[in-house]
Image (cartoon, grey):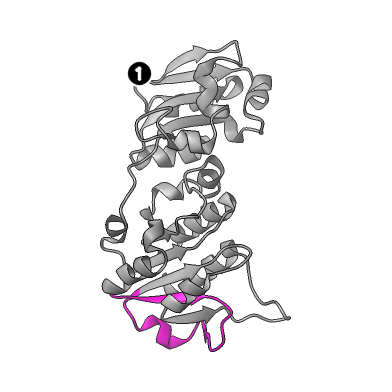
Amino acid sequence: MARVVRVEDLGDERLDVFARLTNNQLRGDLVSDGGALVAESRMVVEVALDEGVEPLAFLVDERDLDSSAGLLARAGDDVCAYVLPHEQIERLTGFRLTRGLLCAMRRPRRLSLGEALEGARHVAVVEDLVDVSNVGALFRNAAALGADAVVLSPRCADPLSRRSIRVSMGCVFKVPWARAEASEWPEGALSALRERGFACYALALEPGAAALDDPALVVPERRALLFGSEGCGLSRAALDACDRSVIIPMSRGVDSLNVAASSAVAFWQLFS
């Protein structure tokens, strides 16, 4: 059972991990070897624990302490649960806490591209998404709709940022993922997919793009779908490295959907 510690001073350095460290600092060695992440809400923390993510410390709203007892019981007594009065929590964090609980956890070991792709048949490839909410939504769709792995470009937002984890409902811990090295993006990463038998399809408004429901798209057993950034879409280099482009047929003059919606449609059609 996590050890309950009531905190009186918001300046207590033990609370830094929950509110005063940047995401870059969390990813470094300031908190633990290999870095840390912050998971928000009991449901998300439960998913993380189920997936073997190690808890380092909890921050609990005093009003939610009793209802969090079952979750705190899953940690050892070397893990502290810092408790603050309700009115102090938002002052510390700067946002309204979802269901009264945060958990600082050790970041899972980073997978290599080969490890993430081991045994995969359906893969989402994401280039330069910068909005952490979009990254989280894509991971939730991937987990729900049949993606076996996710490959991120070097400049993609961090899936293990607090908001991305929350939007994904913890699915960033369920789906294996890897970040491609800058030196291998995009040609090297897509070559690695093609060497494993993947057909690579770009979701892009390109001349000659196939409709998503084209029966020919499901012929290859292994398929990778590429999604581009919020503003510019996929780079020319990524488009040129793909086997073909694919579009979601639309009406009323709408030319595209945001990545949260388009990835759900594409995964359902080609992965599930």
Position of residue 169 relative to residue 78, above or below, is below
Quarter assignment of residue 177: bottom left
98 or 65, which is in the foreground? Answer: 98
Residue at (53, 21) in percent of width and height:
15
The kind of residue on which mark 1 rests is Asp
Residue at (47, 86) in percent of width and height:
214
Residue at (61, 62) in percent of width and height:
230
Instruction: Report if residue 108 is visible in the image.
Output: yes
Q: Is 202 inside the magenta-drawn segment?
A: yes
186 or 204, which is in the foreground? Answer: 186
Residue 129 percent coordinates (x, y): 55, 58
Residue 144 percent coordinates (x, y): 45, 59
Question: Which residue matches tag 1?
Answer: 78
138 or 30, which is in the foreground? Answer: 30
Quadrant location, the N terminus: top left
38 vs 182, left or right, is right
Residue 173 percent coordinates (x, y): 40, 47
Furthest-front residue in this view:
183
Disc 1 crowd rating (10 Å Cα; few below 14, some 14-19, many 20+) is few
Instruction: Report if residue 65 is visible in the image.
Output: no
Residue 69 percent coordinates (x, y): 46, 24
Which stretch did the figure color magenta?
Answer: 196-222
Quarter assignment of residue 60: top right
85 vs 54, left or right, is right
